[in-house]
Amino acid sequence: MQQLSQSLAENLSALDARFGKSADYYAKKIVLYGCPGCIVMFDGMASLDSLWELLLDAAGRQSASVRLTGTQAYAHILHGSAFPAESAPVQDLPQLVARLTAGMAVLLLEGCSSGIVFSVQGLKFRSVEEPSGEGNLRGSREGFTDLLRVNLSLLRRLVRTDTLVQEAAQAHTCCNTEYALCYCKDRADPAMVRRVRAILQSARPELLLDSSYFVPWLLPGKARLFTPVHYTERPAVAAAKLCEGKLVILVNGSPSALVLPALFSEQFECLDDYASTAAFSSFLRVLKYFSFYLTVFLPGVFVCVAVYLPELLPPQLLYKIEAAEKATPLPLFAEMLLVILILEIIREAGLRMPQSLGHSVSLVSALIIGDAAIATGLMSTPVIFVASITAIAVFVTPGLYEPATLLRIGTVLLAGLAGPVGLAAAFFGFLLSIVSTEALGVPYLAPHPFPQQPLSEDGVLRRNYQQLSRHGFNIWQKRERGKRQT
Amino acid sequence: MKQKAGYFTPAALTLSVVTAALADGIPQGVPVRRALWLGAVSTVCLCILSALAAAALLNKAPSFAVRLALTAGLFMELAHIIVQAQGLCAAEFSSMALLGFLPLLLWAGWGIRPASWNASARVLWWFVAVGGVICLLGLAGQLHWYRLFTPAQPTGTNWSVPVYAEYFAGALLCSARSVRRTVWLPVWGFAVQAAALLGGALLFGSGTYPRLELLRAWSSGSFSRMDALLLLLWLLCAVYRAAMLCAAIRLLWQQPEAEVQP
């Protein structure tokens, strides 16, 4: 680790060697209290105006009649004056670089081997806006931004207790990206906090552009369909999760907070649930669960029933399906698979393409899927109807989009190839993958033994919020209860 | 000695027994009322035997002979349920796909820990409960008490009650806290069989119709053939039972063996 030298020229030449060619590197030689010094910072990240107001103006006026050595000037600015310098000076070059890249300005003095840091960040960042991916009718409209420090302040504003801990650290990546581990020390399990902290410190991602990059280190091992973590861009949701004892990981440059551990039922909850009546929110949750199972199983069940168990369908419906299928060249199973894949392609194109082209692509897609495919006799209306319903239903639970899509395709394949047995196998695949999932010892599917305690107080249905508030929820209770069950 | 954490819950064992009982049924060689009485007496006897077995095996390492006997019983049930499920697939769904899935099923049963099967059982119990309600709703209007008292009843003398290995393996397959509940497994088996027998008698009277006819009689509005759905539900439970029995056999052999005294 390269220590700072007492010679200003040596320090500046070391910095020049690193950043000299960078257009945003700013080094301005000054004289303070008769001692030569230099202000170093990155243009656009630190504000020169703020630095002038905080230090240079006042120090310039004071230093007209004073002559100090570097060490004396350092001691005077840091300890003998009211200049709002950071309490921890920088002693070595890596520390200096870390402060500069965090948007701070550093004052280096001749004859002093420490630099004085001033928090004069003037970073430009996306403002605090409502996140586009998490719609809510009630509650806070604030969303996380891309800047870690702003996100931490948003959390601090909501959790105004001394129990909230926000540990910031630098990840071992090629970009030295900063991240923060947040938790409430009176609610989170201390052993799990230590474990997660150690995992994050030992993680070696090549790049860290989002909190989800940590998932392979946090949940190592086998391939899984369901990932027992939750993502949110809302500080209010993150604050609520912190109060449930969960851990929140934020990464600089990303507005997406990773919450762990998470339960399956949480994918069906939102802030609005608690703002409306228990009956209505329970109704909505039942709808959401129904939509999820619809999106996973409806195409497979449709193929299985229509091909292998037609007696289950009412005759009129069966005649219509039969008539539609007679006009198409592909078997029902292949047709369903094709429509699902086409809808996925359209969704992916809609997500990635420039927004200005969105309407054109939507129009073309609607024409191809809605009209041309049926008119040419390539696909039948019932198949397109079923596939469209499932494609829409998946967006009711966006957090489960990935497993739902994979499971839907798997179910169609198995049900189409093996009929009822394939459908049963797909169901067991789904069931076993979901019950085997856990994070930090907390099972993804909460244990509610049937029929003694079939429903959670805040699960598929929820109780009155006053009743729920009587005994607070803590995620680590789930782990203990889960352990007792086994 | 209960040292390992992975045991089955009584709910998982009960689901397994209920699945088997749904397929086996009480032979209709004797009049229904007599069959129910005999069944009830047999169930009490089985409960006593189950309790004795639980008391003998609780908190003790099973001997090799006990393990071998229970393994043989579980293995026979495994073979039996696979044959029943394959027969159903071939007869009702015209499918031999179960044979293709069998290696995967056995592998999953052997490899997946009991906790996962316990959690799966919770979900399947919901399905069974909903299926039972649907079945009852579709048959409700066709069940009549007077058919129980028709004069022409079967007069055969053959009588047997199905006995499952789970009745006696509860102490080794469940945790020490929940062993007491496994003593009531025969009651569950009898309850299912009695319900099916009673349903058949209330629906058909004295005729000895195949049990599947009970499902085929199901009718409600424009849906007239829900038997395939209920059979599919049973198939799910049968697949579960087959895999769970594999896991149970593995669990039996994972337990430490009793030391043989010279």
Image (tube, coloured by chain):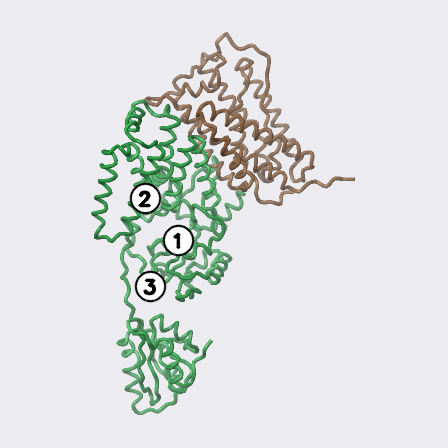
Chain colours: A green, B brown
The image quarter in which residue A36 lies? bottom left
Q: Is residue A356 left or right of residue A347?
A: left
Would residue A71 be seen by someone viewing this image from the given angle?
no
Q: Give the spatial CA distance, label 2 vs label 1.
A: 32 Å
Q: Earlier in the sequence, mark 3 or mark 1?
A: 3
Question: Is the C terminus of chain A in the top left, top right, bottom left or bottom right quadrant?
Answer: top right
- How many other residues sit within 10 Å of disc 1, few (<14), some (14-19) or many (≥20)? many
Q: Give the spatial CA distance, label 2 vs label 3.
A: 33 Å
In the picture of the structure, the residue carrying the numbered disc 2 is A344
- How many other residues sit within 10 Å of disc 3, few (<14), some (14-19) or many (≥20)? many
Note whether A319 is above or below B257 in the view shown: above
In the rendered image, residue B78, in percent from the top left (x then y), is placed at 57, 31
In the picture of the structure, the residue carrying the numbered disc 3 is A147
The one nearer the camera, B65 or A343, is A343
The image quarter in which residue A82 lies? bottom left
Q: Amino acid at mark 3?
A: Leu
In the rendered image, residue A457, in percent from the top left (x then y), is placed at 41, 42
The one nearer the camera, A251 or A264, is A251
User: Disc 2: which chain?
Assistant: A
Q: Amino acid at mark 1?
A: Lys
Q: Earlier in the sequence, mark 2 or mark 1?
A: 1
